Image (cartoon, helix red, strand yellow):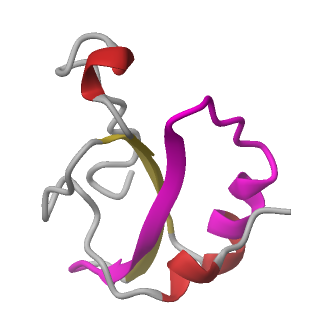
Amino acid sequence: MITDNFLDEARDVPSTTPMERVVAWSIFRSREDARKLLDHVHLAPGQALVGGHGQDSVAPYWWVGVQVQDMSQWGNATAVNKRGRLGD
């Protein structure tokens, strides 16, 4: 089972405050919805889950992302998934 303690950390989404080597993230409007994603994430060696919570002009949010150990193994450094970047 994957721990979800990182969701309790106050940390802006990487599109607001860049975070080193985070290549994919999704935003949720409830902690429960963010937690549900964790059971469906499959990480490769050198990858780890990161995330946190913050608040924008609409409401509080929680986010879950993938941080890679080596960007060169990810491929194109500009090919990052920013799904939910603006809270959509």
Tell me: residue 35, above or below residue 25: below
Which residue lies most toward the left here? Answer: 17
Lateral position of residue 76 relative to residue 28, left or right: left
Q: Residue at x 42, y 47 (%)?
A: 25
Tell me: residue 35, above or below residue 86: below
Q: Which residues are magenta?
A: 34-57
Residue 38 or residue 72, whichever sits in front: 72
Tell me: residue 22, above or below residue 87: above
Image location (x, y in percent) of residue 59: 37, 83
Image location (x, y in percent) of residue 79: 27, 18
The quarter of the picture where residue 81 lies is top left
Which residue lies most toward the top here? Answer: 75
The quarter of the picture where residue 17 lies is bottom left
Residue 13 or residue 42, whichever sits in front: 42
Q: Residue at x 14, y 56 (%)?
A: 18
Q: Residue at x 86, y 63 (%)?
A: 1
Which residue lies most toward the right here? Answer: 1
Image location (x, y in percent) of residue 32: 71, 76
Image location (x, y in percent) of residue 2: 76, 63
Count of number-bearing discs: 0
Residue 33 or residue 45, whichever sits in front: 45
Magenta span has 50?
Answer: yes
Magenta span has 33?
Answer: no
Residue 20 or residue 14, whichever sits in front: 20
Lateral position of residue 52 relative to residue 40, left or right: left
